[in-house]
Amino acid sequence: MITFREVKENGTIKSYIMHADRTLAELGYTEHSLAHVTRVAEVAKYILATLGYSERETELAQIAGYMHDIGNIVNREGHEQSGAIMAFWLLNQLGASPDEIATIISAIGNHDEKTAVPVSAVAAALILADKTDVRRSRVRNPELPAFDIHDRVNYAVEDSKVSIINNKIFRLELAIDTTISPVMDYFEIFLDRMLLCKRAAGKLGLEFELIINNQKIL
């Protein structure tokens, strides 16, 4: 069976992730580098491990999390589908089984909020891990006058934490500097993502909870 370590140490996969991030940098998007995909992999693992899923299913979520954004090297539009196709080819070359490839690529192909559906536990964990990665360090150029709304909202996040409470609630807690970005700006750009997180949490038998500046928002 292919391992997360094999995927993470694979030079070809790493190169595609790095080139995809450079493409997004040219397009003006926030950071989608090795730091982002590694964090997504770790959070996806945390979610399924905490909920008692098997060690193998948890590792598949890690792999999907690490590979989920490679399609950005092709184009931002439809990157979830091109990424799934690329992941199929790469994982097949590494000798992964058809069943496990299917689980991983269906999760990757269903992680973008425009088309996403939490079709499995692995897909749900990937969605939650990806859409809750909001942090200041994702802003590439911290020059306030040049910020668009996405930069402003991410830069305003001073602290971000995800947790599972009593195996009943998936909670995202944010500390936002409202002198940089009002809370309403967060909802303007992330409402679709939060609604998707609610559906993904439901797939795992959880409620989704959003706390901003110690106030429950969702």
Image (tube, grey):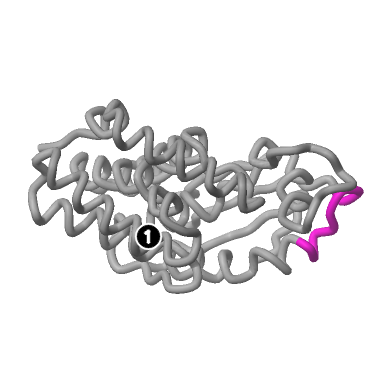
Query: How packed is label 1: few (under 14 Cα within 10 Å), some, or many (20 or more)?
Result: many
Q: How many marks?
A: 1
From what the image shows, is residue 71 above or below residue 67? Answer: below
- The spot of residue 168 in percent (x, y) is 44, 57
Residue 182 in the magenta stretch? The answer is yes
What secondary structure prevails in the magenta region?
Answer: loop
Q: Is residue 197 left or right of residue 144?
A: left
- The spot of residue 95 in percent (x, y) is 9, 41
Residue 43 in the magenta stretch? The answer is no
Pick the quarter of the image with the C terminus. Answer: bottom right
Pick the quarter of the image with the N terminus. Answer: top left
- What residue sits 44% from the left and 42% below the top? 43
Dot 1: element:
helix
Viewer-proximal residue among 151 and 183: 151
From what the image shows, is residue 159 above or below residue 130? Answer: above
The quarter of the displayed image where residue 82 is located: bottom left
Viewer-proximal residue among 77 and 99: 77
- The spot of residue 214 in percent (x, y) is 75, 50
From what the image shows, is residue 180 above or below residue 188? Answer: above
From what the image shows, is residue 16 above or below residue 148? Answer: above
- What residue sits 17% from the left and 53% below the top? 101
Magenta part of the protein: which range? Answer: 178-185
Q: Kindly identify the amino acid type of the residue bearing the numbered disc 1.
A: Ala
- What residue sits 27% from the left and 52% below the top? 86
Q: Which residue is mark 1?
A: 124
- The spot of residue 19 in percent (x, y) is 45, 40
- What residue sits 47% from the left and 55% below the top? 128
